[in-house]
Image (tube, grey):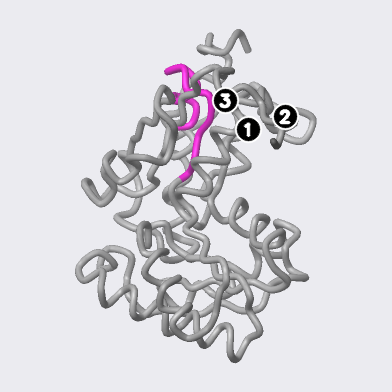
Amino acid sequence: MVPSIDEGISRMAVHVRVVTPITSKGFRKLSDFRGLLPPGDILSHVEIDKGPASIECEYEEMLAIPDTVAKIIQAERDGADAVVIDCMGDPGLKAGRECVRIPVFGPCETSMNLACMLGDHFSVITVLKRLRGQFENQAKLFGAWEKYASVRAVDIPVLDLEDDLGSTVKALTAQAILAIEEDGADVIIFGCTGMLGCADGVSEGLRQRGYDVPVIDPVPVTVRMAAAVAASGLCHSKLAYQMPPRKKIVGYDMPDLYQMSAHGVR
């Protein structure tokens, strides 16, 4: 008989806050995350109040960052144990880490690093061709460039992805096949968190073509990673992500970083 750890041993429950950095109300629902965490853990969700309707370029990402970081700070004060930014641009990731003492995860960084462990070369299948440069820059920033194969696009705007999920899955599958056959990819990453729930359909389409490769749906992977890190008592390094200095800020309604938080005094 194979030895096993007593299944009765439990861990402390964790609270993961998901921050969706767009202002299109209802695009993301709390029910979208059902089943991602085990019973007893908490998953809460907020959207930003100030920023773009969706993020499809660097300019829109910049507009989303201030309120995204404000929502990350508020998550810590609400008692969350970890935060996930619900966008593959990872807007506000580094700034958010500077401002809190709970782990903050971006789905792009998480997915690319996971892809490096699961295969030799990964491709990102995203919404629009214009995002290719952004993902290439992120692969370099996150230390994943050596295993980067390509970025391909389905040419479906973010807010239209759910209009016809069947068509979205077909488009994703077609581009994933091209990434495997023409670009040498052996791992596929969805390049938009709006593609949540499409991984099973794409995986099945690839298997029908004889390709048994991982298809990374960034939201489930990142939420579960955030919960695991929080449950392990780990966080990003405050030597790497030091608290911002005290100084006057003009024009931004941001929380006071040095107020009491649910996780202790600043």
Which residue has dot 2 on it? Answer: 242
Where does the image place residue 260, in percent across and percent down from the top left?
53, 9
190 relative position to 115: left or right = left
Whether residue 242 is in magenta: the answer is no
Whether residue 77 is in magenta: the answer is yes
Look at 53% across and 51% down and name the residue there: 107
Look at 64% across and 62% down and name the residue there: 115
Q: Tag 2: Cα neighbours inside 10 Å, few (<14), some, or many (≥20)?
A: some
Q: Earlier in the sequence, mark 1 or mark 2?
A: 1
- Range of magenta residues: 72-85
Q: Earlier in the sequence, mark 3 or mark 1?
A: 1
Q: CA distance from mark 2 to mark 3?
A: 18 Å
Q: Is label 1 in a helix, a strand or a loop? A: helix
Look at 53% across and 46% down and name the residue there: 222
Q: Is label 2 in a helix, a strand or a loop? A: loop
Which residue has dot 3 on it? Answer: 248
Q: CA distance from mark 3 to mark 1?
A: 34 Å
Residue type marked 1: Val
The reply to whether dot 3 and dot 1 touch (C-beta < 8 Å) is no
206 vs 248, nearest the viewer: 206
